[in-house]
Amino acid sequence: MECNVHWAGGLGMAFVAETGSGHLLTMDGSPDGGGRNLAPRPLETLLAGAGGCTAYDVVLILKRGRHDVRDCRVRLTAERASEDPKVFTRIGMHFVVGGRGVPPAAVERAVALSHDKYCSATAMLLKTAKIETSFEVVEVA
């Protein structure tokens, strides 16, 4: 896996990343740090990536279990260290899984498998942060 990040010099502290799969991702800083608030902050992007990684696992595990999952959302909250490097020290992940007849035990298992075994992003973040998970199942038509 590779990625190239390029500073968009005339735009303050904006950066454009081109991923190895050929996609572009823009990041920017806050105005008090020289940015123009044109895109997510790099650490917001990191948090979003962890959410996407674990949600991917949860949906895949539920689908492989032949559950009728139709929606999956993860609300992430994070706390950071007060001193540099301001790493994540706590991350909360609340999953809302929608479907028809999806057993809560299956969702609990999928979240645990992602957290404990499959999600590479959360495995890395566990080096500095305590990750707490919760979930709810919503019946959808």
Image: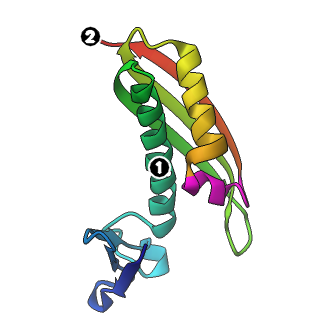
**Identity of the residue drawn at 34% across and 86% down:** 6
Q: Are marks 1 and 2 in contact (CB under 8 Å)?
A: no
Residue 74 sits above or below residue 51 on the image: above
Q: Where does residue 45 sit, x and y in percent of width and height? A: 44, 61
Q: Which mark is residue 86?
A: none
Give neighbour class at mark 2: few <14, some 14-19, many 20+ (Cα, 10 Å).
few
Q: Where does residue 74 sit, x and y in percent of width and height? A: 47, 37
- What's the magenta region? 120-129
- The disc labelled 2 sits on which kind of residue? Ala
Can see residue 74?
A: yes
Q: Indicate which disc, 1 or 2, sits on the residue closer to the N terminus.
A: 1
Residue 7 sits above or below residue 19 on the image: below
The residue at the far bottom in this view is 9
Q: Where does residue 65 sit, x and y in percent of width and height? A: 45, 23
Question: SS for tag 1?
Answer: helix
**Identity of the residue drawn at 44% across and 71% down:** 30
What colour scheme does the image use? rainbow
- Indicate left or right for 52 with 113 as reference: left
- The disc labelled 1 sits on which kind of residue? Cys
Q: Where does residue 29 sit, x and y in percent of width and height? A: 43, 73
- Indicate left or right for 114 with 16 as reference: right
Magenta-span inclusion, residue 94: no
Q: Quadrant of the N terminus?
A: bottom left
- Indicate left or right for 16 with 41 as reference: left
Quickly name the residue at label 2: 141
Question: SS for tag 2?
Answer: loop
Quickly name the residue at label 1: 53
The one of 98 and 26 positioned closer to us in this rendering? 98
